[in-house]
Image (cartoon, rainbow, N blue to C red):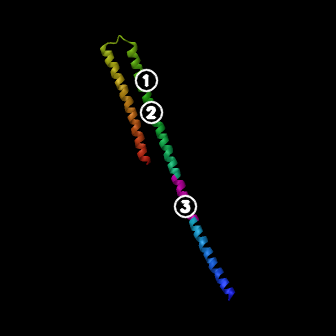
Amino acid sequence: MDQDIILDKLKKAKQELIFNHEELQRCTKDLKIANVNLNIREKEKELNMEEFNSGLEQMMFAISHKVRKSVANILGLSKLLCEDVNLGNNELKEILLLIIQSAESLNASTEELSKFICKKRRTDI
């Protein structure tokens, strides 16, 4: 009789072990799937960041070129105004118009950069 009770307890313990083992295997499988999904999302974020940085670098290069050009124009025209005191009214107006155009170009370049950054931030959120 004691042997039957012990045997019955062993069978129940074995069934519990089998159940727990199967549950552990299911959990392990779920964790592996979750880990794969997490890795995929991480790679996507990494690619998005690389794309953002590449776009930002291209934009910064273009804006930097435009800004340097506008600043160089303004500096050159300003030096011309300082150095040549014998300029007539028409020449002064022409130089001032060129300075204004360069300043407007500089302003447009900075606005373009701001819009680009805002747009990228909205799409990356």
Identify the disc placed on residue 62: 2
The mark nearer the N terminus, 1 or 2, is: 2
**Residue nearer the viewer, 106 or 8:** 8
Regarding mark 1 in the picture, which secondary structure is present there?
helix
- Give the magenta-colored segment's residue range: 28-41
Q: Residue furthest left?
A: 89
Q: Is residue 115 above or below residue 42?
A: above
Q: Cα distance, mark 1 to mark 3?
A: 58 Å
Q: Residue furthest front?
A: 2
Judged from the image, the secondary structure of the residue bearing numbered disc 2 is helix
Among numbered discs 3 and 2, the one appearing first in the sequence: 3
Tell me the amino acid under the disc marked 1: Ala
Quick check: marks 3 and 2 in contact, CB under 8 Å?
A: no
Q: Which mark identifies residue 33? A: 3
Residue 71 on image: x %, y %: 42, 25
- Residue, disc 1: 72
Residue in the picture at 49% in, 41% down: 53
Closest to the observer: 27 or 43? 27
Q: Residue at (50%, 50%) from the top-left corner?
A: 44
- Crowdedness of circle 1 by 10 Å Cα count: few (<14), some, many (20+)? few
